[in-house]
Image (cartoon, rainbow, N blue to C red):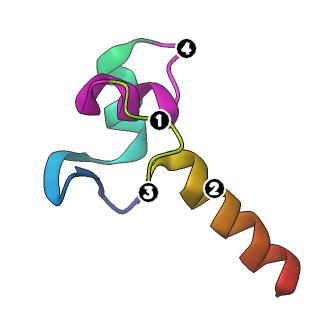
Amino acid sequence: MTEPAAVRCTGRIRTLGTPAELEADLGPESTLDDVFRAVTGNRLGNEEGGIRGVRATHRTARRLG
């Protein structure tokens, strides 16, 4: 069983569900990036706390172990 995921933006939970449920709501080819864009109004830029900054932090953490 997959744990639920929450999409937060500006300190508020915008949607909640399993990743598969969230993706299925948008269509068969959607990704979690698509879900994030849909529920946050496409805030995927380089602003502080944006998805790109989070991804960069995750890559650095994985690399450093």
Q: Earlier in the sequence, mark 4 or mark 3?
A: 4
Residue 28 in percent (x, y) is at 48, 13
Of the pair 41 and 30, the residue shown nearer to us:
41
* Distance in Å between CA atoms under marks 2 and 3: 12 Å
Three-letter code for the amino acid on which mark 3 is drawn: Glu
Residue 21 is left or right of residue 64, and the answer is left
Q: Earlier in the sequence, mark 2 or mark 1?
A: 1
Residue 52 in percent (x, y) is at 59, 47
Q: Earlier in the sequence, mark 2 or mark 3?
A: 3
Q: The C terminus is located in which quarter?
A: bottom right
* Distance in Å between CA atoms under marks 4 and 2: 21 Å
In the image, residue 14 lies in the stretch drawn in magenta: no
Q: What label sits on residue 30 in the rendered view?
A: none
Question: Mark 4 = which residue?
Answer: 29
* Distance in Å between CA atoms under marks 1 and 4: 19 Å
Q: What label sits on residue 55 in the rendered view?
A: 2
- Label 4 or label 3, whichever lies nearer to me, is 3
Question: Mark 1 = which residue?
Answer: 44
Three-letter code for the amino acid on which mark 1 is drawn: Leu
Three-letter code for the amino acid on which mark 4 is drawn: Glu
Of the pair 34 and 9, the residue shown nearer to us:
9
Q: Residue visible at 65% across and 68% down?
A: 57
Residue 37 is left or right of residue 63, and the answer is left
Q: Earlier in the sequence, mark 1 or mark 4?
A: 4
Q: In the rendered structure, which segment of residues is drawn in magenta?
A: 28-41
Q: Residue visible at 35% across and 16% down?
A: 26
